[in-house]
Image (cartoon, rainbow, N blue to C red):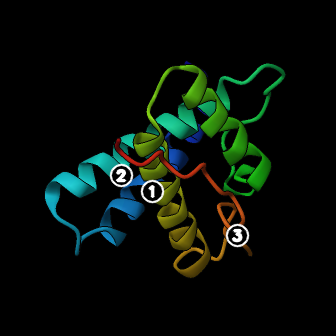
């Protein structure tokens, strides 16, 4: 693996490690779920067609989040799961805004998921 690829992986790894520290007040299971979701999102994003650069937090836009949630829906994931994913992305964005100064606006703001149907 070329040196640059190592540096890119290290940069994303450091960011995720710092996010894990940000989550230190959460229960262990919650931290694990949040970290899995963020890693999955980043992995999905860097595998998009035409993607040539590594993950950068500024790539986390409302459009990207909407596309990711649509992808999860197409994969058959439930509305409840997608709502949890949206919440996790919102939390990650807050970390990028408040702790790292890498985003100006939370990309999940304004994203509405359908209301789940009421049980019969």
Above or below 88: residue 3 = above
Mark 3: few/some/many CA within 10 Å (<14, 14-19, 20+) = some
User: What number is the disc on residue 34?
Assistant: 2
**Mark in the foreground, 3 or 2:** 2
71 vs 117, left or right, is right
Q: Nearer the viewer, residue 85 or 42?
A: 85
What's the residue at 57%, 29% (across, down)?
73
Instruction: Tell me the quadrant of the picture where the C terminus can be found.
Output: top left
Quadrant for residue 5, please give it.
Answer: top right
Q: Position of residue 43 (x, y in %)?
A: 55, 31
Q: Position of residue 32 (x, y in %)?
A: 25, 48
Mark 1: few/some/many CA within 10 Å (<14, 14-19, 20+) = many
39 vs 31, left or right, is right
Which mark is first along the chain, 2 or 3?
A: 2
The residue singled out by tag 1 in the image is 88
Mark 2: few/some/many CA within 10 Å (<14, 14-19, 20+) = many
What's the residue at 36%, 52% (across, down)?
34
- Secondary structure of residue under mark 2: helix
Q: Position of residue 112 (x, y in %)?
A: 65, 57
- Secondary structure of residue under mark 1: helix
- How many angstroms separate mark 3 from mark 2 (CA)? 19 Å
Which mark is first along the chain, 3 or 1?
A: 1
Which mark is first along the chain, 1 or 2?
A: 2
Q: Is residue 13 among the parts visible in the rendering? A: no
Q: Spot the residue most to the left.
A: 28
Q: Nearer the viewer, residue 36 or 1?
A: 36
Q: Position of residue 96 (x, y in %)?
A: 58, 68
Above or below 49: residue 118 = below
The residue singled out by tag 3 in the image is 103
């Amino acid at each position: 693996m070329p040196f640059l690829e190592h540096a890119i992986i290290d940069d994303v790894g450091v960011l995720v490690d710092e996010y894990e520290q940000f989550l230190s007040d959460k229960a262990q299971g919650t931290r694990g779920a949040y970290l899995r979701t963020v890693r999955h999102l980043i992995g999905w994003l860097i595998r998009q067609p035409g993607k040539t650069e590594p993950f950068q937090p500024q790539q986390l836009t409302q459009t990207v989040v909407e596309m990711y949630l649509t992808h999860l829906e197409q994969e058959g994931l439930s509305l409840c799961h997608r709502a949890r994913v949206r919440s996790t992305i919102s939390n990650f964005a807050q970390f990028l805004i408040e702790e790292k100064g890498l985003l100006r606006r939370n990309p999940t703001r304004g994203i509405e998921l359908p209301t789940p149907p009421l049980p019969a």
